[in-house]
Image (cartoon, grey):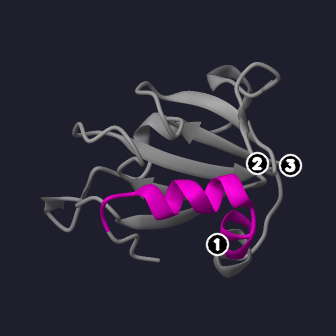
Amino acid sequence: MIFYFGTSLDSYGHYFFNVEENRLNKYDCKINFGNIPFDPEKLPLQKEKGRYNENGYVKFYSIEGYSICAITGSCIDHRPGSKSVFFVKAIISDEELKDLILGIPIAKKMIDKMSFEVMW
């Protein structure tokens, strides 16, 4: 199961979702801030190397049994601080997580809809 924290394809606001083949499922998602060992609101770090990250900046993390791909920016919300955070409860390589994301039609659609280049 892959999870996502961010906006949907058509509405503002950051929420937790189960990522299913062709849809994001917010209502059956059991993930919340209290039951994961990281805060997706703080990923990716907004400032690295002395400057703010531009949209499309990608950072991978492994935190207490979770593999995380955090992207600065959103497929719909262009406000500063928007993010798209995909994660699984497993330790896998950055490349495996990227391939997993791009292999799910709804996730790939989100990436493709981003108005900026995702800098994998």
The percent coordinates of residue 81 (x first, y second) are 29, 39
Q: Residues within 10 Å of mark 3 (few under 14, many from 20)?
A: few
- Which one is in front, 4 or 117? 117
The structure residue drawn at horizontal position 24% and vertical position 59%, both measured from the top left corner, is 53
Find disc 2 in the rendering and name its residue. Answer: 22
Q: Secondary structure at mark 1?
A: helix
Q: At label 2, which amino acid type do we have?
A: Asn
Q: Main secondary structure of the magenta part?
A: helix
In the visual, does 8 lie left or right of 95?
left
Whole-number angstrom distance, CA of label 2 to CA of label 1: 17 Å
Q: Is residue 111 magenta?
A: yes
| Badge 2 or badge 1: first in the primary sequence | 2
Residue drawn 66% across the image and 69% down it: 102
Image coords of residue 10 (percent x, y): 48, 34
Q: CA distance from mark 3 to mark 1?
A: 14 Å
Query: Which residues, given as a range, are shown in magenta?
Result: 99-116
The tag earlier along the polypeptide, 3 or 1, is 3
- Examine the rendering and report whether any part of residue 84 can be seen: yes
- Compare marks 2 and 3 and give the one earlier in the sequence: 3
Occupied quadrant, residue 15:
top right
Label 3: state its secondary structure.
loop
Residue under circle 1? 98
Observer-nearest of 9 and 34: 9
Residue 65 appears left or right of 77: right
Q: Position of residue 38 (x, y in %)?
A: 59, 39
Can residue 63 be seen? no
> Which residue lies under the disc numbered 3?
1
